[in-house]
Image (spheres, rainbow, N blue to C red):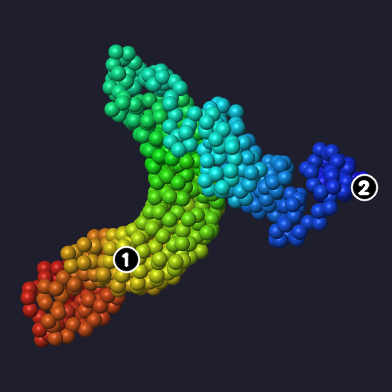
Amino acid sequence: GNITANNYCRNPWLDYEDIVWCITEDSVGDCDVPMCDPRTCGMPSCGNPNLSNSSCLSFLQAEECCQDNDSSCKCALLKDACRISLENNSEDFCDDAILACYGDIYEQNHICNMYEQICTEHPGQLTCDAAARKCCNHSYFTAREQEQCKCDFYTYTSKNMEIRTNLMEENCNAATVASSTPVKVSLTPIKDQLKYFYNHTGGDNWSNNSGWMNDTLHYCKWYGLACNDNRDITGINLRNNSLAGHFNFIDLDFPWLTTLDLAENKLSGIVSIGFAMFLRRLEYIDISENGLSGCADLTFSSSMLHANFSNNNFTCASFKRYNPAYKTLRVLDLSHNAIGQDSSKIFDNFPPNLEELILSDNNIRGTIPEPFPSLEYLTRLDISNNSINGQLPDFSRSTPRIRELNLSNQKQTENGGLTGTISPDFSRLGDLLVLNLAVNKLTGFPSDLGTLLKLKTLDLSSNLISHSIPSELGNLAALEILNLSNNALIGLIPESFANFVDEDYNYTSIFLGGNLNLLDPAPLVLCFLPGFDFAEDKKKCPTERSTLRYFYDSAKGQEWTNSELWLNPHQNHCDWHGIECASGNIIGINLANNGLSGTLSKSIGDLHMLE
């Protein structure tokens, strides 16, 4: 072999100044830097994939080809370097990948997420064994919790990746959980658990603690508890009951529990990963409006349908593909927290069968991934009041059933705010009822939005839209709220907006204020709508023009001999037949011999300049 100083393939960090033995035959000598075959030192050019078995090449590409602040570029290449190392039974560069992808190599959720992604994207015994270790072998899991975690993990890889291993059976048996019906018999007596729960949540100070700690009364009769016929606890509802203090939820071990509602209390502290691991029949959990913190870990059983973690202090959210609830969860509310993840990371592993996803009022940043994850059954998506930037993805392909889409108010930081134009593809969202993209930096929207015939709310206010208003919006017969205020719209307000008033005088609320370049006047019929924000504007809705409208109706104007230009939506009323103006004020009305009938409207007295 050859002795080479500072070999860049074996030792990419030149400032280490290590002298490395690189043997160019079939083996590699001992050294304290990542193990790479020096025969593969030729790095692929930037932009080309690394087809070698050496993880060094992906590492070198990340170092040489990515800009210093381009974490997504480094993340992809270093994750690939980690993957190649794992496939060679090593973990070189994996910490570098976690740091590039998540900015923190010590957060357990980040570590698990990356290794699980590698296992999912490149399934194999070595990659998935490494993921199982990283996700389940952490210090704050007991032996039983580690075994249950691995049972779930290997059940997932066996069913979805056909990776056969005796580790699934070993861990499932060790956790005393049957793989077909994973319900655990509690290891701690139920009453002891309840007393522990009571003492650690300030039970003596609860608003209602009727029956609790009464040894002569069966716990099924204690306030807030529900039981089945076998006296198994199936429900805990202590909402708004003055619970306080830090409670470790993982101590709850009720195998028949289906509902857990501890919302609107004063619980605090970090919620442990896998805290609901042994609540194997839990379907509904609501711990909203407390002071809980940490990472919102959604490691639930295969029964979970509804989870509400809103109004707490969670800083991140974690989803695991191997978790049994990954395909069962339907409703998830993480709003009003302090989640500060990049949107590309938070959408990595979203449960695919969600129907409602609420992430509003957090600190989520970055661009929404394109393509957006496939959420075929999603009907409500609310990510309002965050700091997302970039362009809108094509939701029509990934969320075809969406009914409510709220991405408003993304300008929480200087770099926040959606940009570009709304794609015509939005017109394919035929079930859409609410589209709220207010308070962003959008510059345009297509006339195709006028085909969304079920739409009830369209809010594009406070953007940078600078074109005319498409007349096709007047086709939105179901529309109840149209808000285009505070943009830079130009031209006339469409005459088609008269369609927003039906024969029963049901009307759409229309907001167009703050568009300084819209031409005067507004269509006359809109000026009589209580929900039109320009109704009191003297330029858009001149008072004298409205008075003439009353006069026309009472004098049966539709029967007049000559009613040229009367009630014309945009024509200045001074140009109407028989009207004489001076300085914009009506000074004369001459409709003699013109077939007038009916009554003379009292409103004519409002024409104060009439001579």
- Closest to the observer, 491 or 433: 433
Mark 1 element type: loop
Above or below, 445 relative to 144: below
- Closest to the observer, 284 or 202: 284
Answer yes or no: is residue 608 visible: no
Left or right: 436 in relation to 163: left
In the rendering, at what x and y percent does residue 378 appear? 40, 53
Tag 2: amino acid: Asn
Left or right: 395 in relation to 575: right
The residue drawn where x is 53% and y is 43% is 156
Quarter of the rendering containing residue 139: top right
Mark 2 element type: strand
Sequence-first tag of 2 and 1 = 2
Tag 1: amino acid: Leu
Single out the mark in the foreground, 2 or 1. 2
Residue wearing tag 1:
453
The residue drawn where x is 78% and y is 56% is 43
